[in-house]
Image: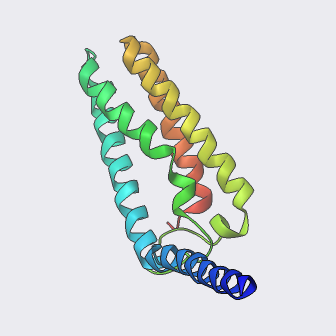
Amino acid sequence: MNRSILRAGLAALAVVVAAGLVVPAALADGPADIVDKRIKQMKKMRTAMTGMKQVVAESALDKAKAEDFSNTVATESKVVVTLFPAGSNVAPTEALPAVWDKPADFKAAADKATAAADAMLAAAKSGDMGKVKETYEAMRKACDGCHDNFLKN
């Protein structure tokens, strides 16, 4: 009798565990959802970089704007690689197949951009206009480096 109860309990546990594994998979984002998130995230970064371009074009530093834009770029840059999982190379993506074919190269480019974004944020917080301009240029080059190799023109 104890074996029957044990078997029934194990069977019930197996069902609960299996259901727990299936439910999160069913709730996971599909490729189209991932592409949509990716597009929104990249637009946020582009908007913030456009704002930084305007900040560095001014003769005096608007520290609040520089910090705000830099913070957005630094925050968003940290999730870039997570937005390109296997199987997310579907329309309307503008990413080149190299993102998925050369993931180590893509991660290295994204890591370079993240480091540049963090430096830009630190410069903005310091209020040093020269450093802000310098780090903005480094960030712009990091963006270009990634786009040149991983984005359709």
Query: In which image quadrant can residue 88 be found?
Result: bottom right
Residue at x-position 75% and y-position 84%: 3
Colouring mode (rainbow / by chain / secondary structure / one colour): rainbow
Marks counted in the figure total 0
Give the answer, above or below, for where 4 lies relative to 37.
below
Give the answer, above or below, for where 103 lies relative to 46.
below
Give the answer, above or below, for where 10 lies relative to 146.
below
Residue 105: % across, % down: 72, 54
Residue 40: % across, % down: 34, 60
Looking at this view, is 15 or 98 the one in front? Answer: 15
Q: Residue furthest front?
A: 1
Residue at x-position 63% and y-position 80%: 9
Q: Is 129 on the left-hand or right-hand side of 26?
A: left
Residue 4: % across, % down: 70, 88
Residue at x-position 69% and y-position 47%: 108
Looking at this view, is 62 or 15 the one in front? Answer: 15
Q: Is 61 on the left-hand or right-hand side of 108?
A: left
Residue at x-position 32% and y-position 41%: 48
Query: In which image quadrant can residue 98 be found?
Result: bottom right
Q: Is 78 on the left-hand or right-hand side of 13?
A: left
Residue 32: % across, % down: 43, 78
Looking at this view, is 30 or 13 the one in front? Answer: 13
Which quadrant, please, contains the N terminus?
A: bottom right
Give the answer, above or below, for where 93 lies relative to 7.
above
